[in-house]
């Protein structure tokens, strides 16, 4: 095997050692991994709003007036004749016109009163209601892991898998 091929990776590794040392000092330790020994999901109970829509149908009763227009025509003719008879003399034309207008109004009103028809219809009503339902939701994971014979426990917001990354700090004991 070519010794130069082995020499290049070895030299690159040695050249990068100061970089790792600088990284250690900059972050106060180095990164390693620890084996996960237990994961327990932690749940919490929360109240969640649920909207529902309640609808129903009601019968509504009433009366409506129908008008054929015949009452207004008949009333205007009668009013015009009466106005013509009453207005003998100089005001005959004015009395005839006034009688026609008043007769038409009275005839139309009488026609509406005479044609009152009862009716029944259905109306749909809806109402939105908010109920609160209790649900269990995953809050976190209690993770127990072991690093160099020591056991540690922490909470994580995701399932860690088989290993967790740890930061290791080494200090001199005096």
Image: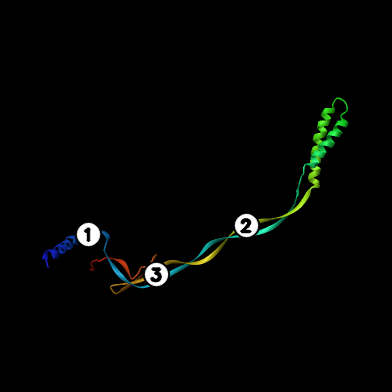
Q: Which mark is residue 59?
A: none
Q: Quadrant of residue 8?
A: bottom left
Q: Quadrant of residue 32?
A: bottom left
Q: Are marks 3 and 2 in contact (CB under 8 Å)?
A: no
Q: How is the image coloured?
A: rainbow
Q: Are marks 3 and 1 in contact (CB under 8 Å)?
A: no
Secondary structure under badge 1? helix
The answer to whether 34 appears left or right of 89 in the picture is left
State the CA–CA distance, disc 1 to disc 2. Answer: 69 Å
Residue tagged by mark 1? Answer: 22
Disc 2: CA contacts within 10 A as few (<14), some (14-19) or many (>=20): few
Residue tagged by mark 2? Answer: 126
Q: Position of residue 122 (x, y in %)?
A: 69, 56
Residue at x 40% of width, y 68% of height: 141
**Which mark is nearer the camera, 3 or 2?**
2
State the CA–CA distance, disc 3 to disc 2. Answer: 47 Å
State the CA–CA distance, disc 3 to disc 1. Answer: 33 Å
**Which mark is nearer the camera, 1 or 2?**
2
The answer to whether 75 appears left or right of 18 in the picture is right
Please determine whether, in this image, residue 44 is positioned above or below residue 64: below
Q: Which quarter of the rendered picture does the C terminus lie within?
A: bottom left
Q: Earlier in the sequence, mark 1 or mark 2?
A: 1
Q: Are marks 1 and 2 in contact (CB under 8 Å)?
A: no
Secondary structure under badge 2? strand
Seen from the viewer's position, the closer of residues 162 and 100 is 100
Residue at x 22% of width, y 59% of height: 22
The answer to whether 154 appears left or right of 132 in the picture is left
Seen from the viewer's position, the closer of residues 57 and 167 is 57
Residue at x 81% of width, y 34% of height: 100
Q: Position of residue 154 (x, y in %)?
A: 37, 68
Residue tagged by mark 3? Answer: 142
Disc 3: CA contacts within 10 A as few (<14), some (14-19) or many (>=20): some
């Amino acid at each position: 095997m070519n010794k130069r091929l082995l020499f290049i990776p070895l030299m690159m590794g040695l050249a990068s050692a100061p970089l790792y040392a600088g990284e250690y000092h900059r972050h106060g330790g180095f990164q390693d991994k620890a084996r996960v020994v237990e994961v327990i999901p932690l749940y919490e109970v929360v109240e969640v709003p649920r909207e529902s829509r309640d609808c129903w149908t009601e019968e509504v009763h009433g009366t409506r007036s129908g008008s054929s227009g015949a009452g207004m025509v008949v009333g205007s003719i009668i009013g015009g004749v009466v106005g013509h008879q009453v207005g003998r003399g100089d005001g005959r034309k004015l009395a005839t016109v006034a009688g026609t207008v008043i007769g038409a109004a009275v005839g139309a009103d009488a026609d509406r009163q005479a044609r009152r028809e009862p009716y029944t219809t259905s109306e749909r009503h809806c109402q939105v209601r908010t109920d609160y339902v209790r649900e269990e939701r995953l809050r976190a994971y209690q993770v127990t892991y072991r690093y160099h014979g020591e056991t540690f426990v922490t909470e994580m917001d995701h399932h860690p898998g088989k290993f967790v990354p740890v930061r290791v700090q080494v200090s001199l004991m005096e």
